[in-house]
Amino acid sequence: MSKDYADLHDPNAEYTMRELSAETMGVSGKRGGRRDVEITDVQTTMIDGNFPWTLVRVYTDAGVVGTGEAYWGAGVPELIERMKPFLVGENPLDIDRLFEHLVQKMSGEGSVQGVTVTAISGIEVALHDVAGKILDVPAYQLLGGKYRDKVRVYCDCHTADEADPEACADEAERVVEELGYDALKFDLDVPSGHEKDRANRHLRNSEIRHKKEIVEAVTERVKDRADVSFDCHWTFSAGSAKRLAAAIADYDVWWLEDPVPPENHDVQREVTQASPTTPIAAGENVYRKHGHRRLLEEQAVDIIAPDMPKVGGMRETRKIADMADTYYVPVAMHNVASPVATMASAHVGTAIPNSLAVEYHSYQLGWWEDLVEEDVIEDGYIEIPEKPGLGVTLDMDVVEEHMVDGETLFDEA
């Protein structure tokens, strides 16, 4: 036995195991060094992007500040302000415990689903940034390490006339050739000019032919240069969704997303199982692992699509991915966020085996990447940073320039 190892078991030795651990981390001071940290404040600022992004910052008595983001939604900043007393004085390294603590404390506000879960998600992401910085590791390390060095991004595409198949095909080709993406998504819940009554969710045959023309034009234009998915935004009836999936079965469709409303899991299962060729994706409109359980257990999706800063945060998304992996279902994270939550989603994407891609919804917003000091997306991929925490730094001048009217800038660290 070496002398150093023996000293750890000697009560008279100069260092105890705990003190040596703190010394090895390059810290010293009260009790456990860096591990004795307390949250001192939580602040939010809303950014007027293509969605109203809610940025969240968690401050600590160690001078370490973590940045997160909650999915947009009315009342999210107010809910986070309500949670502040449940966080101040707590240890930010206890991420799981604090998540459950907030769920319990906010149960009266509806912490099973909805904007309360979204508000908790923003705090949870910020806690990963804090913890990574305190422990001097990238956020993905807190989730178990990485499977890949970079995460694929799929670009949500739009045109001036989204009902024009050739306009969609032109934009698909431009995004592939000029912007470097090899994964795309287009909307199919667009007017065809053949509608009689959109409220009944029924697709007439002429409407299905129009949507088939969009799929054909886009997939035939890009061919093997890009994977293409199509979003329906929960618009169609069960019968129409089945007919649509069958109509596009001969084309190279990555997935058909949210063809039916999200409330009835039985219908979702029937539509998915009736579509043996066209993969069906869903999940962004349910919350936490509990909301995704039936989708997976009943094999109601071919691809699960949680929205990380909405569904419960980074660890909750990891839990959903683990559940999905037991059913051999891949994960394509929905994402309409700023660079902060986009990078946080990428950290999750690198830490799970079954990641397909993370969505990018802001390619037409010229200043999206200016919000942080680092590059985020390069040639359709996010290279996972090795910096502590999320690895992105807010540019406070850009934050201030694009704040929603009436918002207040964060305090300095």
Image (cartoon, helix red, strand yellow):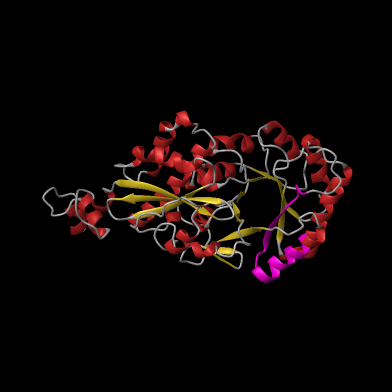
Q: Residue at x 71, y 59 (%)?
A: 227
- Residue beneath the point at 27% across and 58% down: 25
Picture coordinates of residue 154, whole percent (x, y): 64, 58
Q: Quadrant of the C terminus?
A: bottom left
Seen as rendered, the residue at the extreme bottom is 178
118 relative position to 155: left or right: left
What is the count of numbered marks?
0
Tell me if residue 315 comes above or below residue 105 in the rendering: below
Query: What range of the chain is rendered magenta?
Result: 168-190
Q: Residue at x 85, y 51 (%)?
A: 210
**Quarter of the rendering containing residue 411:** bottom left
Please tell me which residue lies in front, 256 or 278: 256
In the rendered image, residue 180, in percent from the top left (x then y), is placed at 65, 68
Please identify the residue farthest to the top as the structure is shown: 108
Q: Is residue 41 magenta?
A: no
Residue 352 point in image, percent of width and height: 53, 51
Pick whichever, 258 or 122, lies toward us.
Answer: 122
